Image (spheres, coloured by chain):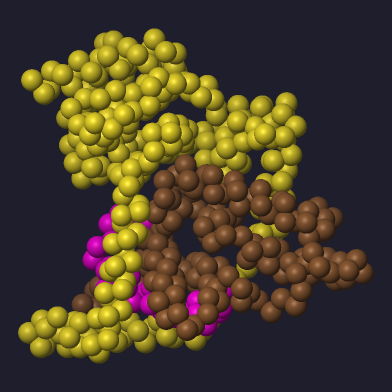
Chain colours: A yellow, B brown
Amino acid sequence: MQCAESLAVQAAFDGELDAVSAAAAERHAEHCPECRALLEHLERTRTRIRREVDYGRASPELQARIARMLDAEAAAAKRVLGAAARPAWRLRPFWLGTLAGAAAALAASLAVVMLAPLSPAALPDELLAAHVRSLMPGHLTDVVSTDRHTVKPWFAGHADVSPAVADFSAQGYRLVGGRADYLDRQRVAAVVYEHGAHVINVFSFAAGVRPLPAQLSRSGYHLECWHAGDLGYCAVSDAGWEELDGLARLLQDLAAHDTR
Amino acid sequence: MDDKRTRFEALVLPHLDAAQRLARWLCRSPSDADDIVQEAFMRAYRAFDSLRGPDARSWLLAIVRNCHLSALAERRRRAYEPLTEEHQAQPAPHAPAALPDPERASIARDQGRTLARLIAALPEEQREVLLLREVEDMSYREIAAVAQVPIGTVMSRLARARAALKLTWLEAGGEPHAVR
């Protein structure tokens, strides 16, 4: 029932797309009555919320409470230092331990929920959303470099995996940089390539033997995944299948070479 | 030691208003919200050394959210205290849909409060992303960091929140564009 472009139209409205993608979304909305209505609704909602709904500012009382709390914290830190760095929790009543226990149990249960990997069905959506999102201005790369010796080490501190990285300019795939994204409940590494006018994001993440989505197209984007060791790779782009496949094969060869 | 406090006041304290707004949207009772903000600032101060990167606001708001969840869990654990957070909204005398026609005029005069009430009726996970996007003007990535969900989830929650607002507006008989 809902237009497939509605999320892209929303993202354009929220300023999350680069100029080209945003223009495409706007062009689409011109011809799609549903998305045109959506845009009007988004505009109206935003105006009204910003004009009429406000929970205001922190009260002077709250500001004073925060200031007193900071005073107490700073003083406690000094006392702890004075008392030969006695653990801070000893200074507090015993029943706080119970609360901390409950909080820890809650945190643990949340962690279990949040660490469960996404279903294979959800993964393509996550990857496409991450790709689309990366195209907004200033979000494509966290580290800009055509040198794999810069890009690869950067991931060590920013992602949970260390992917295969190389500049394939000679074959038409220019290495642009890298980025850390959060999806599939982990910090994944995204290596960014340019092929002609197309941006290709190559996501890599810990996948084990988990099945990855097969080749698929959605909303004009292609997605191709493969395993290399215990890493999963997914390349996403609006480039053609052959172009995407060309990069996939180069990276597969590279990974095979690296592990031997 | 004082250096830590100075840095904290420069980096984190400017986001007190945003923290207060998020707490207010999440738990609705102003005094509970203030308690949550104070608790969040205490945790933030104690964990300040673990703050990495420039985005202190997302970091602080994620702590506010966690404090809210802990407070909620604590309240649920003490079963004798009823679950208030979904029902004890602002002094809202009637549900808008139940009002007879003549009173619609007074609703229109008080659209701001009506809108706040409709937003308050949204599920918490949707209300939260809506606030962070429309009021705090945060990017999807920042919202994802606060809500601790993937960006795709932020996008779909935002879409659902906005769509639900449209439906509830219609049901409440409101004429959003008639008011300026």
Question: Is A227 inside the magenta-drawn segment?
Answer: no
Q: Please give left or right for residue A1 compared with residue B108 in the image.
A: left
The boundaries of the magenta stretch are B28-55
How far across and how far down the image is residue A25, in percent? 61, 30
- Asked if the stretch drawn in magenta spans residue B32, the answer is yes
Residue A148 lies, in percent from the top left, at 20, 27
In the image, B76 versus B36, the foreground residue is: B76
Write the residue at 44% across / 13% down.
A240
Q: Is residue B20 visible?
A: yes
Q: Point out the image quarter for the N terminus of chain A.
A: top right
Q: Is residue A235 above or below residue A206?
A: above
- Up-down: is A188 above or below B65? above
**Is A199 or B108 nearer to us in this picture?**
B108
Displayed quadrant of residue A184: top left
Could you say where residue A166 lies in the image, as x and y percent from the top left? 22, 22
Classify residue A84 as left or right of residue A174.
left
A6 versus A218 height, above or below = below
Residue occupying image coordinates x 83% and y 65%: B108
On the image, the x and y values in percent for residue A246 come to 32, 12
* Magenta-drawn stretch, dominant element (helix, strand or loop): helix
